[in-house]
Image: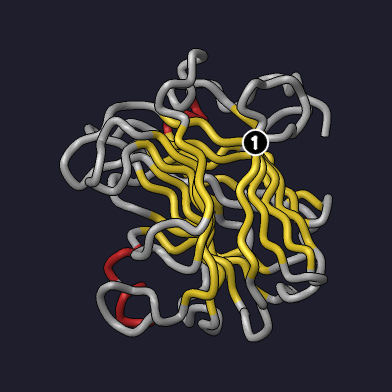
Amino acid sequence: MKHVLLVAASAAALLGAANAAPATVNLLPGYDSTFPGRCGGSPAVDCESAVAEFRKGDNGANASEREVGIGLNTTVPQADEINVSTDPDGLWDSAAFDFLLSYDETPGVLELAIDLDRDNAFSAGEEVAFNVDLAGVTTMYIRIATGAGGSPTTLGDLALDGMALSIPSFSTTTNSYLELSDFTWDADWDLSGFVIMDGTVGSNSRPSVQFKLTDLPPDAIPVPAGVWLFGSAVAAGAARLRKKSA
């Protein structure tokens, strides 16, 4: 099976595609400029119920840290995190790893697991968890940020409850968002895929992927159905054979 890539890079071309999906997906390029206003100002946390993230650089606190974290919102210290800055395999340096973000309604646990050692399994020490009630959550925003110099951050093979998401790949020099709506977030669910981070940490430019569960209604600016933006990384060879089992 081949990967469909979500890439933060440069240049774009238009293509068409359609796949069955269990949720409505909307592309919001450059959404950092409007998200704070919709989410109660800056910092934009009033609408956030929980946030899970992959991060190269600790949001300015320690640029050498590479972390996986989960917690209440994007401004408070993570409730649970893994610091992988000393990973011998060079995690975050152009190497792909699989992840699983899941919610267990009873007892209300949001968990982010990653295959750190790439052994086709999620093992002890490879997950972070946060107790949260997602009642009232209406949307998930997936924020994808580039590294210093516009180095790409790649997200792909996204599947929600085992169903492949019909997702646009895109190219931008600013932060971009995917909005997932029309889904029941306070029941059991899982979101799987893979992530690749390239480049270095620079001033106000730290590669990251954030999964923001919010109470915001879907954005009022839809992307036309069947229109997808594919970045230059896709044109250069946007697929690799999947070597991992689900």
| Along the viewing direction, whichever of 42 and 145 lies nearer the viewer | 42
**The disc labelled 1 sits on which kind of residue?**
Glu
> Which of the 4 image quadrants contains residue 146?
top left
Give the image location of residue 90, x and y in percent: 46, 17
Is residue 139 something that shows in the picture?
Answer: yes
Q: Secondary structure at mark 1?
A: loop
Write the residue at 83% across / 50% down: 162
| Along the viewing direction, whichever of 235 and 39 lies nearer the viewer | 39
Q: Is 63 located above or below residue 45 in the figure?
A: above
Q: Is 181 located above or below residue 197 in the figure?
A: below
| Along the viewing direction, whichever of 160 and 20 lies nearer the viewer | 160
Q: Is 18 located above or below residue 196 in the figure?
A: below
Write the residue at 63% across / 36% down: 194
Give the image location of residue 23, x and y in percent: 72, 67
Q: Is 164 positioned to the left or the right of 33 in the image?
A: right
Write the residue at 68% across / 46% down: 158
| Along the viewing direction, whichever of 207 and 232 lies nearer the viewer | 207
Give the image location of residue 159, x and y in percent: 74, 49
Q: Is 74 positioned to the left or the right of 227 in the image?
A: left
Pointer 1 local density, CA inside 10 Å: few below 14, some 14–19, many at least 20: some
Is residue 230 something that shows in the picture?
Answer: no
